[in-house]
Image (cartoon, rainbow, N blue to C red):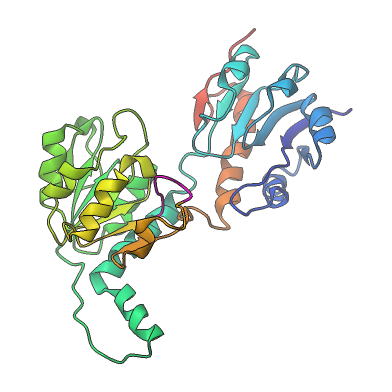
Amino acid sequence: MSETDIVVLREGTEGLSMESYADALRERLPDRTVTLARTPKQERELVADARVVTGITIDEDLLDRADRLELFACTFAGTDHVPMDALAEHGVAVTNAGGIHAPGIAEQAIGNMLVFARRLHEGWRRKERAEWRHFQSGEFTDSTVTIIGLGSIGQAVAQRLQGFEVETIGIRYTPSKGGPTDEVAGFEPDAIHDALSRSEYVVVACPLNDLTRGLIGEAEFATMPTDAVLVNAARGGIVDTDALVSALRSNKIRGAALDVTDPEPLPADHPLWGLENCLITPHTGGHTPKHWDRLADIVAGNLGRLDEGEELENQVLAAESN
């Protein structure tokens, strides 16, 4: 078996074929060997001689024979499903796909805010009924938008809000770092409630962890103005679903736009489906045809960094010698 620079594992993601991912890597690395493993047998054979393997996850059994393997490039931003301990034991570095979804998610978050500002969803409902009857829209201009989380997604939202003539508040773990928003605050409850109390729009763009699980719940909805709109572009578990249903039903807030839910997928009989002031998309905010192009840029660049012994982009686990 000849040596292979990059092996692309067969399991696709987000409705995008791994063939297109492999093609994107080949375009960037015309002088390297990039191979798509289409069957379990091919995966076993090819991984054994690969320097880089990329996919959703990797079977631990494949690692025992992967003597040349230097890097596993996960195609997801999260790596909690990846056998990190086994990879560390084999001295294999791990990178993730963090940041590649940010442009699409940011555009969708802003689109959802504009939908509520202009009441486009009401226009759509009246169009379906062939009902030519005017309704009052608002303006996005002069609103205050709080962005919870100033990672790649939060920064992309803030960047795209420039020119809309809105005030922005960013919430981040280390507010001393500053950020692209007009104000920056920390995750302390008092700071979050202060921001929520002044916001017409709240965009959730932070990771789900012990600090953020249930971050937006009954108390937070009570603090938000009754004309506020919640946009969750992160993870469903950051928002208390029962509290959200209650807030939407009782008009404690004006509405919500959810690209993520808890539970997910959202059961067909869940009350959120029946609420006109709740827009739902099935976790598609970051799914665009540019997904593989952005990831291929990272993985192709990291192959060169391996050659030069440089730090890898999006590295979440460093390689260690056995």
Q: Nearer the viewer, residue 246 or 31?
A: 246
Q: Position of residue 162 (x, y in %)?
A: 26, 58
Q: Position of residue 136 (x, y in %)?
A: 18, 80
Q: Nearer the viewer, residue 62 or 315?
A: 62
Magenta highlight range = 259-265
Residue 69, quarter of picture: top right
- Residue 211, above or below 16: above
Q: Nearer the viewer, residue 83 or 184?
A: 83
Q: Nearer the viewer, residue 309 or 12?
A: 12
Instruction: Give the residue at x 59% y 23%.
Output: 83
Instruction: Give the residue at x 43% y 49%.
Output: 102
Q: Residue furthest top?
A: 322
Q: Position of residue 307 (x, y in %)?
A: 65, 25
Instruction: Give the residue at x 67% y 48%.
Output: 21
Q: Residue furthest right?
A: 1
User: Magenta part mainly helix, strand or loop?
Assistant: loop
Residue 315 in view (yes/no): yes
Quadrant position of the C terminus in the picture? top right
- Residue 297, above or below 271: above
- Residue 308, above or below 12: above
Residue 183 in view (yes/no): no
- Residue 47, above or below 85: below
Residue 264 inside the magenta-drawn segment: yes
Instruction: Give the residue at x 66% y 35%.
Output: 54
Q: Position of residue 131 (x, y in %)?
A: 33, 90
Quadrant position of the N terminus in the picture? top right
Residue 228 inside the magenta-drawn segment: no
Q: How many marks?
A: 0
